[in-house]
C-alpha cells in the first residue's frame, strides 16, 4: 500500500525521469502524419500490491515497456516478440475510442490508492483519465474494452518476461 501518511507510492528518481520522458515523448519520432487527435502513445500507471507501482508505456510502433517505482524496468521485448507488438498496436489504435472520456492535462500526478491513471499521447496534447479495475461502470463500454486491451498487453509482457527468463536459464 502507499504510505498512509501521504497516500503516495515511494518512487526513485530514475522512475520519475523515465516516466516523464515517456509521457512527453515527441510524436515526430514516428515520422507519420498524425491527425491532432490520433493517439500515438499510451502510458498507464498501475498500482500493484506490496507497494509496487508500475507504468506501462506503449507506442503505435508496437513498443511496450514496463517501468517500476523502485527503478527497475523491463524493456526491449517488442524487438523479439511479435505477439507483443500486435497486442500493443491494437491497444494504441483503439485508445482513440476513450479520448472523449479523457481530459486534456499538463499535470502527471502519480496514482493514489488503487486507481489506474491512463495518459493518451496525441499530436494535440496529452489526455488523462483514471479507472478503478473491477469497478468500471457498465455504461462505459469503451473503458471496459480498453481495460481488456491493456490487460492483454500486460499479459503478453509477462509471457515475454517468462520466455526471457527461461532463455537465460537455458543459456546459463
Image: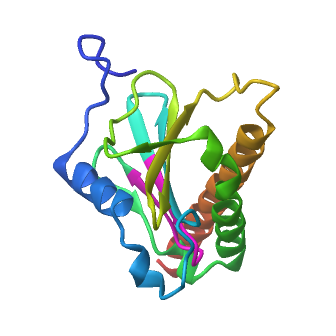
139, 156: nearer the viewer: 139
- The x and y percentages for residue 22 are 36, 62
State the residue lying farthest toward the bottom: 31
Q: Position of residue 124 (x, y in %)?
A: 45, 62
Quarter of the image with the N terminus in it: top left
33 shown above or below 122: below
Left or right, residue 164 beside residue 50: right
* Viewer-nearest residue: 78 or 169: 78
Residue 75 is covered by the magenta coloring = no
Q: Quadrant of residue 138?
A: top right
Instruction: In this rendered view, identify the residue nearer to me: 80 or 6.
Output: 6
Q: Give the main secondary structure of the magenta stretch.
A: strand
| Location of residue 37 in the rendering, given as x and y in whole percent from the top left corner | 56, 62
Residue displayed at 48% across by 88% down: 31
Quadrant in the rendering for residue 78 = bottom right
Q: Which residues are magenta?
A: 55-67
- Eyeballing the image, is 84 above or below 125? below
Give the number of callouts: 0
Describe residue 48's horizontal placement relative to residue 4 as left or right: right
Check the image and report above or below for 77 versus 102: below
**Residue occupying image coordinates x 29% and y 55%:** 20
In magenta stretch: residue 59: yes
Residue appearing at x 40%, y 81% in the figure = 28
Residue 91 placement (x, y as % from top left): 68, 60
Residue 88 as seen in the image, left or right of residue 130: right
Front residue of 168/39: it is 39
What colour scheme has been applied to the protein in the rendered image? rainbow
The residue furthest top is 5
Amino acid at each position: 500500500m502507499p504510505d498512509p501518511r501521504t497516500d503516495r507510492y515511494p518512487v526513485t528518481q530514475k522512475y520519475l525521469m523515465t516516466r516523464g520522458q515517456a509521457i512527453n515523448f515527441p510524436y515526430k519520432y514516428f515520422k507519420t502524419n498524425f491527425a491532432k487527435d490520433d493517439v500515438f502513445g499510451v502510458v498507464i500507471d498501475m498500482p500493484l500490491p506490496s507497494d509496487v507501482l508500475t507504468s506501462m508505456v506503449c507506442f503505435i510502433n508496437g513498443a511496450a515497456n514496463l517501468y517500476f517505482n523502485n527503478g527497475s524496468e523491463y524493456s526491449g521485448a517488442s524487438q523479439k516478440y511479435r505477439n507483443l507488438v500486435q497486442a500493443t498496436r491494437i491497444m494504441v489504435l483503439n485508445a482513440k475510442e476513450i479520448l472523449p472520456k479523457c481530459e486534456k492535462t499538463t499535470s502527471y500526478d502519480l496514482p493514489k490508492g488503487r486507481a489506474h491513471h491512463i495518459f493518451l499521447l496525441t499530436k494535440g496534447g496529452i489526455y488523462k483519465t483514471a479507472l478503478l479495475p473491477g469497478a468500471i461502470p457498465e455504461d462505459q463500454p469503451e473503458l471496459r474494452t480498453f481495460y481488456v486491451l491493456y490487460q492483454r498487453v500486460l499479459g503478453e509482457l509477462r509471457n515475454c518476461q517468462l520466455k526471457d527468463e527461461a532463455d537465460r536459464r537455458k543459456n546459463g
